[in-house]
Image (cartoon, rainbow, N blue to C red):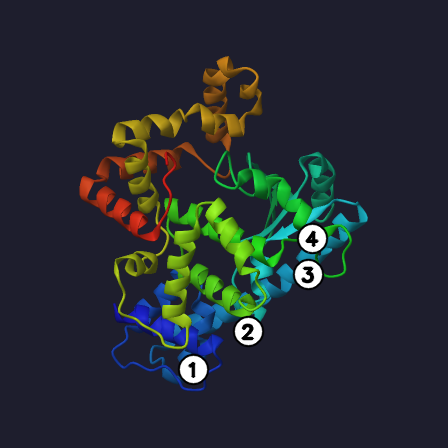
Amino acid sequence: MNENRVLLEIVRSFIREEKKPVFDKNVNEEALYKLARRHMLSNFLLNWAKENCQNETIKARIQADFNQQIIKDTNENIEFYRILDEFEKAQIKTLVVKGFLMKEIYPQNYMRQMLDIDMMAYAEDFKKASQIMENLGYSEYYDHEKHLIFTKEPFMTVELHRKLIPGEGVGHEYFNQKVWEFCEPYQNYKMIFKMSKEDAYVFCMLHLLIHFRFTGIKIRDVLDVYLYYEKYKNVLDQEKLNEKLQEFECQKFEENIRKIAYQWFGESPNYDFDEVERFILQGVSLKNQVNFEVGEKGGKNQYLLRLFFPEFKVMRGKYPILEKMPILLPFTWGARIFKDVFSKATSMNERFETIKLIKGTNSEEVTKMQEIYQKLGIVRKED
């Protein structure tokens, strides 16, 4: 698909501050715009649109996306520091993660689109933090095992994490607990922190690996890897970095994603896309998750069963009481289903949509997904 190459060239030209315009008379402008939107990169099209776009409707949409991103980014910055200031006053020890740190590595940080603001605090501070969020005009949207989600109209979403790695995933003990020991102060705050550069990069890889396993990742995620590594490659402790990548079973995955990142955005770009690259370019999809889980769980019937009745090790992460009283497992299954029925964040309708996709899977798609994961070095759960 020609639009894949053109979009990558446009993004690469922007981040490298190249003056040479990207032009291809054969590009489908609507398809290019939709591709950029799917990968959260439409604001990168602004200069291209002014010089090359012939479709006035698409040009207007690109300008509108850019304007909206500027407004959204401005409000996110204001809200972000309001929250940090209040948490600092309340002596809530807080770890800033993901999006706001990634914004710092972009040539203009407003170019990095975010879905939400992420931070982690100790669970015992959640009641105090929730009150602060309410005082700032936020409403609690969803209480998940891993985080509390707060929203504020028209577009603010804040995830306050108890954990960064769900359940018993690889690296959960380190990034949910021990990481605090190695954090650095964030800007001039005393109670607000960020990870070390090595930890932030490894966590980025684990986060991408989790997303890749289930729904896939976006071009923007690969761009994050390129910009982060390019900015800090001369100051990263490579020995420590490699040890942690190996410890958390993502060394091969990191090597492959970084290789793709440099092929797309580096000094000598290569757009002869292989199977893995084409898979990433498709973007995130619930169908990917279904194909993965069907292969992971050992078939359609097993996946359907686990969709409503997860394994004990999964439920233990959501309901800690099972550690002491595993006999309560059937009751927690019932509680989980009841919660989903009335949840704002998930619904039984979504589960029924998943069931339709499960029934529609075929062995060829499942096998292809497993082959891609094998090439990437993604470690399967049972390994």
Among the two numbered marks 4 and 3 on one chain, the one whose residue lies closer to the N terminus: 3
The image quarter containing residue 154 is bottom right
User: Considering the numbered disc 3 on the image, is that residue within a helix, a strand or a loop?
Assistant: helix
Query: Measured along the vertical axis of the image, is residue 322 above or below residue 271?
Result: above
Do the residues bearing badges 4 and 3 touch, measured as CB atoms within 8 Å? no
Mark 3–mark 2 distance (CA, rounded to whole Å): 20 Å
Tell me how far mark 3 sits from mark 1, CA to CA. Answer: 30 Å
Q: Is residue 308 left or right of residue 144?
A: left
Q: Measure how far apart labels 4 and 3 are at the Cα level.
A: 18 Å
Q: Vertical placement of 175 versus 265: above or below?
A: above
Circle 4 sits on which residue?
193
Among numbered discs 3 and 2, the one appearing first in the sequence: 3
Q: Quadrant of the C terminus?
A: top left
Taking the view exactly as shown, the residue that stands out farthest to the top is 327
Q: Picture coordinates of residue 179 (x, y %)? A: 63, 45
- Residue at 57%, 64% in the rendered image: 103
Mark 3 or 2, which is nearer the eye? 2
**What kind of residue is marked 3?**
Ile
Tell us which disc is closer to us: 1 or 4.
4
Q: Nearer the viewer, mark 4 or mark 3?
A: 4
Dot 1: within a 10 Å radius of its alpha carbon, few (fewer than 14), some, or many (20 or more) residues?
few
Instruction: Look at discs 2 and 4 and give the one toward the viewer.
Output: 4
Q: Where residue 187 sits in the image (x, y, percent)?
A: 72, 61
- Residue type highlighted by circle 2: Pro
Q: Nearer the viewer, residue 146 or 170?
A: 170
Tell me what residue is drawn at x 81 percent, y 49 percent.
Answer: 89
Residue 50 image label:
1
* Picture residue at 57% right of the left edge, 25% below the top: 320
Mark 2 is surrounded, within 10 Å at the Cα level, by few (under 14), some (14 to 19) or many (20 or more) other residues, namely some
Would you name the residue on which mark 2 appears?
Answer: 107
Q: Residue at x 32, y 36 (%)?
A: 296
